[in-house]
């Protein structure tokens, strides 16, 4: 089933209140299998796809989520 985490999906994988390079590092580790995201991290990191600029979470953390977080850090998107 499609999981919707609109209120929590902000890209803050570390849960420290910031979306920064530490979130990218953790996301990269999850993508290559070096770490497994817990439920809270998945809820915060599952930001892709974007629908009208708002995360429409699909229950997975993958390269699409990583790229959205990267774009948020670089300032090219904001949600």
Image (cartoon, helix red, strand yellow):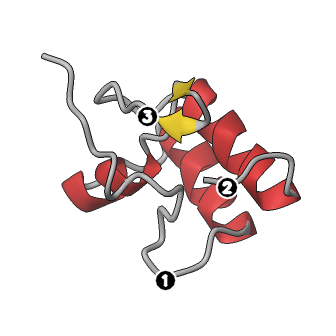
Question: Does the residue at mark 3 contact the one at mark 2 (Cβ under 8 Å)?
Answer: no
Q: Secondary structure at mark 3?
A: loop
Indicate the position of residue 42 as horizontal and vertical percent values: 33, 48
Question: Picture quarter containing residue 57?
Answer: top left
For the point 56% across and 57% down, which residue is it?
26
The quadrant of the image that shows the N terminus is top left
Count residues near mark 1 (Cα–Cα under 10 Å), then give few for <14, some for 14-19, many for 20+.
few
Residue visible at 20% across and 20% down? 2
Q: Sequence-wise, which precedes: disc 3 or disc 2?
A: 2
Residue 4 in picture, x, y percent from top left: 24, 35
> Comparing marks 1 and 2, which lies closer to the viewer?
1
Q: Which residue is mark 3?
A: 61
Checking the image for residue 24, the label placed there is 2
Distance CA(mark 1)–CA(mark 2): 13 Å
Looking at the image, is mark 1 or mark 3 earlier in the sequence?
A: 1
* Closer to the camera in the image, 79 or 26: 79
Please state the horizontal and vertical placement of residue 22, each as a whole percent of the image.
66, 69
Could you classify mark 3 by the number of other residues whose Cα lies within 10 Å: few (under 14), some (14-19), or many (20 or more)? many
Residue nearest the observer in this picture, 30 or 73: 73
Q: Residue furthest left?
A: 1
Q: Quadrant of residue 50?
A: top right
Answer with the quarter of the image where residue 63 lies: top right
Seen from the viewer's position, the closer of residues 78 and 25 is 78
Q: Which residue is mark 1?
A: 16
User: Which of the pair 20/50 is nearer the observer?
Assistant: 50
Dot 1: element: loop
Q: Which mark is residue 43?
A: none
Q: Earlier in the sequence, mark 1 or mark 2?
A: 1
From what the image shows, is residue 5 above or below residue 1?
Answer: below
Extreme-top residue of the structure: 1
């Amino acid at each position: 089933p499609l999981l919707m985490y609109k209120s929590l999906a902000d890209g803050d994988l570390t849960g420290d209140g910031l979306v920064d390079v530490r979130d990218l590092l953790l996301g990269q580790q999850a993508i290559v299998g070096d770490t497994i995201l817990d439920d809270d991290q998945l809820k915060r990191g599952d930001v892709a796809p974007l629908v009208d600029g708002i995360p429409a979470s699909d229950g997975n953390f993958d390269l699409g989520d990583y790229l959205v977080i990267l774009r948020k850090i670089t300032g090219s998107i904001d949600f």
